[in-house]
């Protein structure tokens, strides 16, 4: 998680700021960008395995998804999906969930799915308490 190895993530943030200065995308385009961003962020959860080199170029896929979701996040569809009470609660607790679950997963993505059962259960319990 050292900065030199995450420069491309900062570059994505810079590109979002520069794009915002030029104007916001149309609602239709923003919705498409948001949806594409969600797909790019969620697909690695299913497709990456223990053999997937990470971090590396494969980290650019979810980072690109996050950038698209952020830039398209003002679309009506994004506001509806992220504005519900459960999503807001999970967002409020996300860093805490990250800190509680990542060490149990061995500190990396992919691998044995059994490593995710405890963190996933904790997330379900945390969301149910909302």
Image (spheres, rainbow, N blue to C red):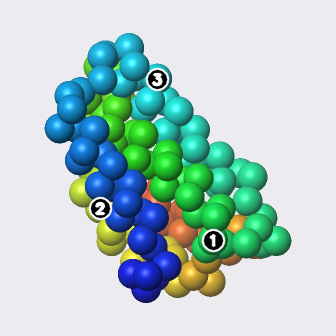
Q: Which residue is mark 3?
A: 32
Residue visible at 38% across and 14% down? 28
**Is the residue marked by circle 1 packed among few (<14), some (14-19), or many (20+) residues within 10 Å?**
few
Q: Which residue is mark 1?
A: 56
Q: Which residue is mark 2?
A: 93
The reply to whether residue 2 is in sight is: yes
Q: Nearer the viewer, residue 91 or 33?
A: 33
In the rendered view, tell whether residue 15 sits above or below residue 26.
Answer: below
Q: Secondary structure at mark 2?
A: helix
- Determine whether label 3 and label 2 are within 8 Å by CB: no
The span from disc 3 to disc 1 (Cα, nearest Å) is 26 Å
Residue sitting farthest toward the right: 51
Q: Secondary structure at mark 1?
A: loop
Q: Is residue 4 left or right of residue 87?
A: right
Q: Nearer the viewer, residue 126 or 45?
A: 45
Residue visible at 46% across and 23% down? 32
The earlier-in-sequence mark between 2 and 1 is 1
In the rendered view, tell whether residue 48 sits above or below residue 86.
Answer: below
The earlier-in-sequence mark between 3 and 2 is 3
- Determine whether label 2 and label 1 are within 8 Å by CB: no
Residue 101 point in image, percent of width and height: 49, 74
Residue 112 point in image, percent of width and height: 77, 72
């Amino acid at each position: 998680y050292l900065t030199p190895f995450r420069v491309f993530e900062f570059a994505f943030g810079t590109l979002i700021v520069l794009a915002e200065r030029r104007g916001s995308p149309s609602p239709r385009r923003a919705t498409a960008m948001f949806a594409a961003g969600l797909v790019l962020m969620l697909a690695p959860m299913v497709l990456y395995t223990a053999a997937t080199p990470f971090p590396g170029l494969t980290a650019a896929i979810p980072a690109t998804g996050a950038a698209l979701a952020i830039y398209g996040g003002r679309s009506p569809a994004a506001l509806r999906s992220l504005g519900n009470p459960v999503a807001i609660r999970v967002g409020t607790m996300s860093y805490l969930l990250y800190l509680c679950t990542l060490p149990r997963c061995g500190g990396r993505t992919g691998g044995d799915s059994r490593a995710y059962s405890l963190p996933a259960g904790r997330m379900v319990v945390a969301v149910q308490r909302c």
